Amino acid sequence: MNRLIEVPAMTDKRIIQHAATYGLTFLGLLMVTFFVPMISVLTIILLPIPMIIFSSKYGFKPALFLWLFVLAIGMLLTWFTLPFVLIMGLGGLMIGVAINQNQHPYEVLAKGTIAFVVTLAVVYASTQLIFNMDWVGQFEASMEESIDTTVSTVEDIGVDVSSEDLEIVREGYQELIYLLPTLMVLVGLFLAFVSQWLSYKWMNRKEKRNYKFPPFRDFSFPTSIIWFFLLGIIMSWIYTDPADTMYLAATNLYALPGLLLVLQGLSFTFYYTHYKNWNKSIPIIVVIAFVLFPFLLVFPLRMIGIIDLGLQLRKRLEGNK
């Protein structure tokens, strides 16, 4: 009987000790992010990892209490930590809980991405409503400053820049503003992937686990993404006025599924190379070429992605074995 009572007590004590360790680690990384700007990019990426590791061990409720504790301490230190605790803490919590539930790595990635994107959107909206921060205005000011600096540098070396060229550059920057929701999703996906991958490496080494992502060639989106892309194309034909609210929706509904279809095309490239037993360097070369010359490869890779999903090419190829 005494033994039954002592075991939970020991377990609770262990949880509290680990919570203190990971909470202090999170807060330490948070302080370094604020006071050592030279390495803040690295520490921001590392911020979700303590929350991921703790919540992967103990599940949702202990992780939620840890996050609330870190949130309270962070707010006592400075209000400026709130966005970081919200975004990185909840993103890490969702990834860790999904790992704790033994979900597929890509399911973990999807939930982590959603958590990061939602919290990014909440921080973006709340800072505008509560603190009257004009993110778009600040971006436009930075854009003009960047353009002026570039023009000055180019003219110093004897190259004239026409007003038409400047207008094209400004239109390109303006499109980035319209694509802000898509950029948020891409940032969320990046943060989720990197923090999940680093956490896998840590847990495999320290806890002797065997966490890993499946081969990229097995990665695939649901077929419904094609319909979202087609809807985006139709809407972009209808709503052509940038002043129209629906223009923003149409632009992002076209851009985001289009980028995901490019990712599908890259995945199929890896799959087909493996299927044909071709040299493994071929898909790597394709990825490098895409990074260096994205505008040349976006359309063919997107078409490959559409064909792969629409015709279920992988199932057909597997059936031919």
Image: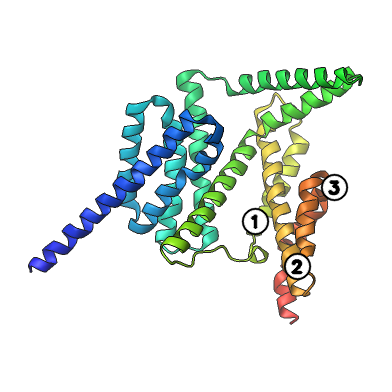
**Mark 2 burial class by Cα count in 10 Å: few <14, some 14-19, many 20+:** few
Dot 1 or dot 3: first in sequence order is 1
Dot 2 or dot 1: first in sequence order is 1
User: Three-letter amino acid code at disc 2?
Assistant: Lys
Residue designated by label 2:
280
Q: Secondary structure at mark 2?
A: loop
Could you say which is closer to the camera, residue 149 or residue 245? 149
Q: Secondary structure at mark 3?
A: helix
Residue displayed at 32% across by 47% down = 21
Residue displayed at 13% across by 67% down = 4
Q: CA distance from mark 3 to mark 2?
A: 22 Å
Closer to the camera: disc 1 or disc 3? 3
Q: Is residue 108 above or below residue 163?
A: below
Q: Quadrant of residue 314?
A: bottom right
Looking at the rendered structure, the number of numbered marks drawn on it comes to 3
Disc on res. 296: 3
Q: Quadrant of the N terminus?
A: bottom left
Query: Where residue 76 sits in the image (x, y, percent)?
Result: 32, 27
Residue designated by label 1:
224
Query: Where residue 179 sits in the image (x, y, percent)?
Result: 67, 34
User: Three-letter amino acid code at disc 1?
Assistant: Ser
